[in-house]
Amino acid sequence: MKPVGYMAAASLASWAGVAAIVDRRTSLEVFFGMLGPFAAASATWFLTAWFYRERPEELTGLMAAAFLLKMVFFAGYVAIMLRVAGFRPVPFVVSFTGYFIGLYFMEALYMKRLFSERSK
């Protein structure tokens, strides 16, 4: 789907820009700070778009379940990246937070467009 492609392009382009000016370790931490939010936003977009077209009456339940699942996923993801992978908190968390906000903003705009298609 095009929205996921645009989210991937924006994420990779911004990461490449950062990677060009920081050291290798920071670049890796920024990349993984991007990867978790991108994976969650992409999965949510695929499911939302499919449910909205195929079973719109079940969309609210899906979104509530996805919200709870993402809370668990993000808690585990951040804990693993900081404790197991040993990433430094500042570069990882700043990257994670920035990509989280940016990608979910993009997803919200795509959802607005998707939902307005049917109301026309």
Image (tube, helix red, strand yellow):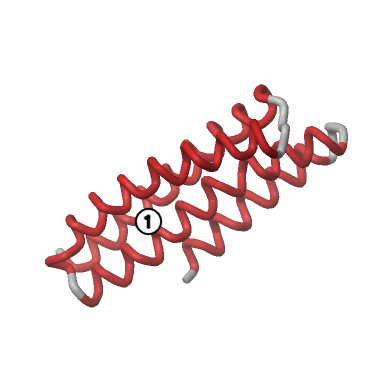
Q: Residue at x 24, y 68 (%)?
A: 52
Q: Residue at x 31, y 45 (%)?
A: 68
Whether 33 is drawn above or below 114: the answer is: above
* Left or right: 29 in relation to 56: right
Residue that protrudes farthest toward the left in the picture: 57
* Left or right: 108 in relation to 88: left
Q: Secondary structure beneath disc 1? A: helix
* Left or right: 73 in relation to 5: left
Residue that protrudes farthest toward the right in the picture: 23
How many numbered marks have been drawn onto this rendered protein structure? 1
The spot of residue 99 in percent (x, y) is: 55, 39
Task: Indicate the quadrant where residue 119 lies.
Answer: bottom left
Task: Indicate the quadrant where residue 28 lies.
Answer: top right
Q: Is residue 120 visible?
A: no
* Left or right: 20 in relation to 71: right
The spot of residue 71 in percent (x, y) is: 38, 41
Q: Residues within 10 Å of mark 1 (few under 14, many from 20)?
A: some
The spot of residue 46 in percent (x, y) is: 40, 66
Under mark 1, the amino acid is Tyr
Residue that protrudes farthest toward the top in the picture: 90
Of residues 11 and 92, the one drawn nearer to the viewer in this rendering: 92
Q: Residue at x 31, y 72 (%)?
A: 50
| Quarter in which the C terminus is drawn | bottom left
Residue matched to label 1: 110
Residue that protrudes farthest toward the front in the picture: 84
Q: Residue at x 45, y 52 (%)?
A: 41
The spot of residue 113 in percent (x, y) is: 31, 58
Of residues 3 and 77, the one drawn nearer to the viewer in this rendering: 77
